[in-house]
Image (cartoon, coloured by chain):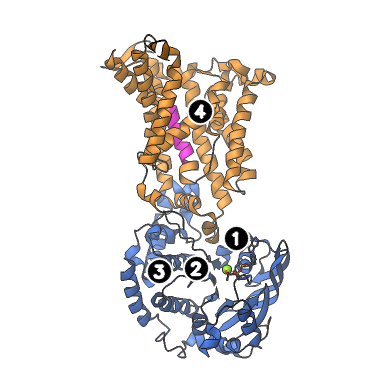
Amino acid sequence: MDIGFVLTQTVLTFIGFQACYFAIAAIGLNVQFGFTGLLNFGQAAFMAAGAYGMAQTVPIFEISLWWGMFIGIAYALFLGLLMGVPTLRLRADYLAIVTIASAEIVRLVVRSVEFQDTFGATDGLIGYAESFQQVGVDLGLNSTADYGFWIFTFSGRDLWRLIVGWSLVAVFALIVWSLMRSPWGRVLKAIREDEDAVRSLGKSVYSYKLQSLLLGGTIGAFGGMYFAVGQAAVQPDVFSRDLTFFVLTGLVIGGVAKVTGSIIGPMIFWGIYAFLDSLLRELVDKPVRIGDFTLIQSTDIGAVVYMVMGSGLVALMVVRPQGIFGNRKEMAFDGR
Amino acid sequence: MDDDMSLTDTSGAADGIEGTVDTTAERVYSEFAAKARAALSGVAPEPGAPKPDPILVANGVRRAFGGIVAVDVDHIEVQRGSITALIGPNGAGKTTFFNLLTGFDSPDTGTWRFDGADMGGVAPHRMASRGMVRTFQLTKSLTKMSVIENMKLGATGQKGEKWWNGLFPATWRRQEAEIEARADELLKRFRLDHMRDEYAGALSGGQRKLLEMARALMTNPTLVMLDEPMAGVNPALKQSLNAHVRGLRDEGMTVLFVEHDMDMVHDISDWVIVMAEGQVIAEGTPDDISSNTAVIDAYLGTHQGRSLLEDE
Ligand SMILES: Nc1ncnc2c1ncn2[C@@H]1O[C@H](COP(=O)(O)OP(=O)(O)OP(=O)(O)O)[C@@H](O)[C@H]1O
Ligand SMILES: [Mg+2]
């Protein structure tokens, strides 16, 4: 077994592309779920909105890739209004139901044969990301050459997308961090605790909840846009419920209502995933048997990794319910 | 911590608040109390009596929950600048009436005017900016926010509460500092300044009542509606709360409060409105009310408020 390989995989995934776009999505979800207490179970839909907004530009609309940013934002805002306007006046559970259903609807629409010419159906869309990669090349990162040192060696293409991605993480983290320290953020946190108290003090709870949903959704859409340009291809099934719940899991691991938690949580999530996955792959290069009984073989690894991670998450919730960076004190007092 | 508090508050009660003299000498009225009582002296002690200068007027407000008619108020007026108590046995509809007046619930029928403006159908969050603020029977302190943050939330018209300003502290920092100064001043008055940076969840029940009242005052209201401000507050703290409520009137605010503690009602109110089974059954000065047979019947009917009789 090559433990060096396992650790390298772990570290590279920890700071990798996947951790990065998950972190962007989690920063957005944190605005809604962490700070405002909105149960958005459809972050995947916002990510799809951003991703498809980007991907449609060149192949479908035949415009420059960069317009994709505006299209992605517009899609996300439209989606947010569609989900939020009817439900945010109602009890919290309604938003949860509507978001989870909307996310599925979005996925089914973009993968439907009916809209093949608009969204590319199950094949998805490709052939739009060149101008993104070109910027990296123009900045002097040869896309095939290797850069870096020791285990941190990346192709120019990889390095470019990581630089862009973590810069986006930094920008959104800073925006959310400063907003949450402003009086605006104070209202959101108050809504999370008691809407009626906030109403009695003269704030329109509905309007703030909508703002929170739209802001978080737009940031989620940026996660999707980044995914689209980084991956240079989008397929509908990327935006499944798994995506939403992995983002949520990352956030919970890191600690809700903490900006650092929303960044490091997804990193840890994928770091642990890569660790377990490569460790098991090293250990189970041939099936492990006890007598005639096959304990584990390489095709089981995916499932086993999720089982172990699930148990780990349960253990974390028992030992540290506020997540790694969460604030124990904010957890400690119960409502009344 | 809590023990310390009650001690401080006992001493606080003796200091009273500017405008009130010793709290125990209840017949020594401040100039404002005298004014309010003088204005109300000519008012007939009967349900729905018109007042010389009403800030709040409600007409035919009715709300039924299924078969129960929780509120059925024909006519009610609240005198500006007075402390008006709203009393009645449990389930009389006092809280429901508060909810209706503040837009947290909508009546089946009825209209009401605040400061001359029709308030029917006005959303609850628009009440504060019009000068009407309420507290809740079950305290709603935001326990996971600090005491000072709770207070600052109360200020209306904050520039920094617009998201596009949120990102630019320069646009709201000055206002925030003013708000904070005002909040600190109120906290001091309510003797919560030593808890300023604690989570509100660390406060005792009585302290939370105080915080909620202080926070409501951050909206700069003209009418303060308090739903059982004294529930669960220890007697020593009650004395200082009494002083605070008087202080509000003495600053020109109108206070409408729900209370079961008849001693307090007698002590601080200029006018008393009695509800039972959703209707206003009596009105009058505290003295009128304690001798009103309809009131005594209503209370005895549900075995409430024996102190009413025992006091006399
Ligand atoms: N949401 C509701 N649904 C059904 N019935 C309700 C509701 N709210 C109040 N009621 C009923 O309306 C009546 C008046 O209740 P309300 O809470 O206004 O009484 P109250 O005078 O505030 O009593 P208390 O002094 O005990 O606080 C009660 O009979 C109550 O059961
Ligand atoms: Mg009540």
Residue type, numbered disc 1:
Pro
Chain letter for blue, please. B
> Is residue A238 placed above or below A253 in the rendered structure?
above
C-beta proximity under 8 Å, tags 2 and 4: no
Q: In this rendering, which labeled residue sits more in front, label 2 or label 3?
A: 3
Q: Is mark 4 within 8 Å of ligand 1?
A: no
> Is residue B295 placed above or below A218 in the rendered structure?
below
The CA distance from mark 2 to mark 1 is 16 Å
The CA distance from mark 4 to mark 3 is 48 Å
**Magenta stretch containing residue A24, yes or no?**
yes
C-beta proximity under 8 Å, tags 4 and 3: no
Secondary structure at badge 1 equals helix
The residue under label 2 is B220
Q: Can you tell which mark lies on residue B186?
A: 3
Residue A142 in percent (x, y) is at 37, 13
Q: Residues within 10 Å of mark 3 (few under 14, many from 20)?
A: many
Q: Colour of chain A?
A: orange
The residue under label 1 is B124
The residue under label 4 is A243
Kindly identify which chain the residue marked by label 2 belongs to: B
Residue type, numbered disc 3:
Leu
